[in-house]
Amino acid sequence: MRSSNPVFSRRGFSRDNGYAGFNTAPQAGYAQGNPYAQNPYANNPYAQQDVQQGAPPQAPATTGRMTMDDVITRSAMTLGTVAVGAVLAWALLPVSSTSYGLAIGAAIVAFVLAMIQSFKRTPVPALILGYAAFEGVFLGVISEMYNTQWSGAPFQAVLGTMAVSGATLLVYRAGWIRVTARYARIGMAIAIAFVVVMAVNLLLVAFGVAEDGGLRSFGPLGAIVGIIAILLGAFFLTLDFKQIEDGIAYGAPKNEAWLAAFGLTMTLVWIYVEMLRLVAIFSSSD
């Protein structure tokens, strides 16, 4: 089992070094009868050196291992790059067909950089920050467009994204959600089905078979689809949180914090875009 996000291609933490997110790092409660867990010390050089009488692995105190501070710092850098790109795009690119074309181009470049990083064996900060910058340009342009038609929509979407991510973290930390193999399989099956349906809907709209955006219309059906998408974003966050937690516990290398930041950024962008559409739908119905 491995964490993933909307592009379904992000790798887990360093596989060459014996840790690959959910692939090799089971939950610490394996001894309590977790049917999906295996020996957490097998093939994990970071955990083996700290094993004493079957005790759960602890993050080493030595340098060179990923810590929560590393994850927070890299995430702040990545999300900060997205924010700077968005602000500059909003300020420098007036709403027009040209800026809309630039936004689409930026989104394509961001997607390509994300895919390249997803197939890299190690994190490349330049690729991750480049993705964040181009994603920021895309978000800045579309946010300005939404704000022109629905004043205040981007601000409400930011608040909504913060609320969803904060609530998800609270529920995860409280233990109300247990990220197991079964949980991940069911969630990923739903997510893949959702993306396939959205891709088919896009084709139907492009060929004129479905009108007014089809399932992505600005009506009740579009609102339902948007809520489902946001719930999927929250699901991805729980996988990200678990992967980060396991990476720290099992001593993943410090540079793997960039992968954590990459995944969190992609998930939060997913939630923000869907929240922006949902705010616009509810504003249109007023």
Image (cartoon, helix red, strand yellow):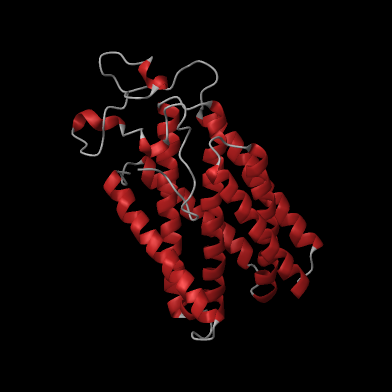
Towards the viewer: 56 or 207: 207
Towards the viewer: 70 or 109: 109
Q: Quadrant of residue 95?
A: bottom right
Give the x, y percent position of residue 99.
75, 68
Q: Quadrant of the C terminus?
A: bottom right
- Counting labels gives 0
Give the x, y percent position of residue 59.
43, 22
Give the x, y percent position of residue 92.
81, 61
| Residue at the far left in the pictured view | 33
The residue that appears at 39% across and 43% down in the rendered structure is: 2
Q: Is residue 114 above or below residue 49?
A: below
The residue that appears at 36% across and 18% down in the rendered structure is: 48
The residue that appears at 20% across and 38% down in the rendered structure is: 35
Q: Is residue 68 above or below residue 204?
A: above
Q: Quadrant of residue 47?
A: top left
The residue that appears at 31% across and 23% down in the rendered structure is: 56
Q: Quadrant of residue 159?
A: bottom right
Side of 226 where 140 appears, left or right: right
Side of 117 where 185 appears, left or right: left
Work out whether residue 285 can be spotted. no
Side of 195 where 84 appears, left or right: right
Give the x, y percent position of residue 6.
48, 55
Work out whether residue 284 can be spotted. yes
